[in-house]
Amino acid sequence: MSEQYSSVLLERAVSEFAKLPGIGRKTALRLVLYLLRQPVDESDAFAAAVSELRHQVRYCRVCHNISDTDTCEICANPRRDASTVCVVETVRDVIALENTGIYRGLYHVLGGVISPMDGTGPADLEIDSLVERVRAGGIEEVIFALSSTMEGDTTNFYLYRKLSPFGVRLSVLSRGLSVGDELQYTDEATLGRSLVNRTPFDGTSR
Amino acid sequence: MSEQYSSVLLERAVSEFAKLPGIGRKTALRLVLYLLRQPVDESDAFAAAVSELRHQVRYCRVCHNISDTDTCEICANPRRDASTVCVVETVRDVIALENTGIYRGLYHVLGGVISPMDGTGPADLEIDSLVERVRAGGIEEVIFALSSTMEGDTTNFYLYRKLSPFGVRLSVLSRGLSVGDELQYTDEATLGRSLVNRTPFDGTSR
């Protein structure tokens, strides 16, 4: 049942919000009415932030991460380790890895994974530019940090074939129990993998 | 922990979304990245809908409902019963009552309820304009459809004092079991009220 509002403007704003993932019409209405109650400059700032992001945002010409400049802050940072490149699917993965505070190398955002089901082939991804980066030299290790899915594995293998001729070290994120996971609730595939890839234990938890 | 993004534009858009009620920074990031993936005219339509709603929306001069015109569609509709006015707190309540498809009268949006705790007094609400509507004549019944809370009851009583001199019929939404509720899970206050206000039964469920 589509609700009828007394205002076409309200109807349109609610419809726009309801297009966002995970936002239904009830939530959309709540958000829109909230914006209506704010001072005009607050809702203007909201609309401007959306519009300006879409029109002004750029993607780093090196790693294809979201950036305000030609080269992103990470690639331009001389204190980052330029000899290590971590290959990820999306900008969100960059943010997730940055939040760990552990990684000091650079990134390469593929824009997805190879997925014949979704019609995504190697040519739709930033694979050629990755090969070029490696070919240009200066990179010692490429870390594959793609999803632990069939599509991710397929892409890992494709990248392996493309990059192994250059003699750089290739690695992949370890798979195993999530920190905090209980053994009994871990799926068999993960549990099996964590057994095969068991790591030496020196008495400290890392 | 505040996350660091590689783009100030992204940071600003996420911050704006995260100001919305019930939207945390993770969800905000997801929504913003979704908008970034859409065609430019889609995200422009989103920003424009928000901006235009805020700048162009008006409130009905009669009932204070959201409207695109001076008088809202409901008040301007000659097929609505202008002798009945339903007093509600917010625009959302109008939408909720309209969705029942049962009510054919007009509305009056107070803009809230009397709440000393929140600093909302009678002068902050559209009470004077309600009294004027009733004084102007033509209204036979005023239905109080406010929240079933102490503040709602206080406001009901205040309105009762203001409107009873005009000799119009005053009524309040019935309170009782929600449709579909099981007796054992209904709170005592509601159950007691539904017992006191029991209605004659003619063998049909209404």
Image (cartoon, coloured by chain):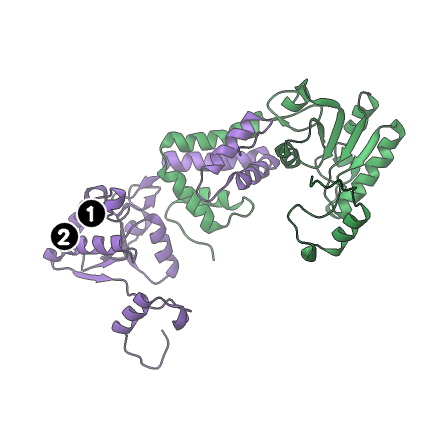
Chain colours: A purple, B green
Instruction: Tell which subunit mark 1 falls on.
Output: A
- Relative placement, left or right, of B23 versus B5 is right
Quadrant of image for the C terminus of chain B: top right
Which residue is more in the foreground, B199 or B32? Answer: B199
Instruction: Tell which subunit mark 2 falls on.
Output: A
Residue A109: x percent and y percent?
28, 49
Residue at (87% x, 36% y) in the render: B161
Residue of label 1: A127
CB atoms of marks 1 and 2 within 8 Å: yes
Work out which residue is located at the far top of the displayed protein and give it. Answer: B78
How packed mark 1 is, by other alpha carbons closer than 10 Å (few <14, some 14-19, many 20 or more), is many
Work out which residue is located at the far right of the displayed protein and give it. Answer: B165
**Amino acid type shown at disc 2:** Lys
Q: Are marks 1 and 2 on the same chain?
A: yes
Which residue is more in the foreground, A72 or A172? Answer: A172
Q: Earlier in the sequence, mark 1 or mark 2?
A: 1
Q: Look at the picture and state if A12 lies above or below B10.
A: above
User: Tag 2's secondary structure?
Assistant: helix
Looking at the image, can residue B115 be seen? no
- Relative placement, left or right, of A87 versus B63 is left
Which residue is more in the foreground, A176 or B77? Answer: B77
Residue of label 2: A162
Q: Look at the picture and state if A202 lies above or below A162.
A: below
Residue B167: x percent and y percent?
88, 28
Residue B56: x percent and y percent?
57, 25
- Relative placement, left or right, of B85 versus A52 is right
